[in-house]
Amino acid sequence: MIFATEDAPMQIDPASLPRRATAEALGAGILLFAIVGFVIAADRLTDDAALTLTVNAIVTGLALAAAIVAVGPISGPTSIRQ
């Protein structure tokens, strides 16, 4: 949990650190799996470099969005004050 007081504007509950770290690792794993997997697949499917780069950019954006939606509520931003 993140909470703010007047003395300390932003503090992170130490008990939530393992949960947040696991969520960050899961998000990084989602990105790694999607990007590396698609680069290999695109390389085998077509020789057109422009098409490969375009679709890689689209897949990277979609994988990033999926990772944010999946783990965002757990590891979310620490700069939002409640």
Image (cartoon, rainbow, N blue to C red):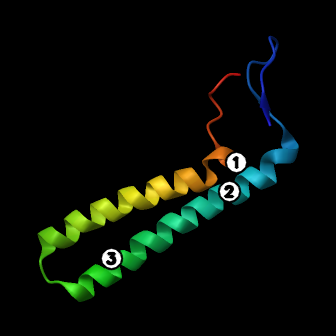
Which class describes the residues within 10 Å of circle 2: few (<14), some (14-19), or many (20+)?
many
x, y (%) of residue 46? 17, 84
For mark 3, what is the residue? 39
Kind of residue at disc 3? Val
For mark 1, what is the residue? 74
Quick check: marks 2 and 1 in contact, CB under 8 Å? yes
Residue at 48 percent across and 64 percent down: it is 31
x, y (%) of residue 72? 61, 47
Q: Earlier in the sequence, mark 3 or mark 1?
A: 3
Residue at 37 percent across and 56 percent down: it is 61
Kind of residue at disc 1? Ile
Q: Earlier in the sequence, mark 2 or mark 1?
A: 2
x, y (%) of residue 12? 78, 35
Image quadrant of residue 4? top right
Residue at 14 percent across and 83 percent down: it is 47
Residue at 72 percent across and 59 percent down: it is 22
x, y (%) of residue 39? 33, 76
What separation in Å lies between label 2 and label 1 (alpha carbons)? Answer: 6 Å
What separation in Å lies between label 2 and label 3 (alpha carbons)? Answer: 24 Å
Q: Earlier in the sequence, mark 2 or mark 3?
A: 2
For mark 2, what is the residue? 23
Above or below — where is 33 with respect to 75?
below
Q: Secondary structure at mark 2?
A: helix
Which image quadrant: the C terminus? top right
Q: Secondary structure at mark 1?
A: helix
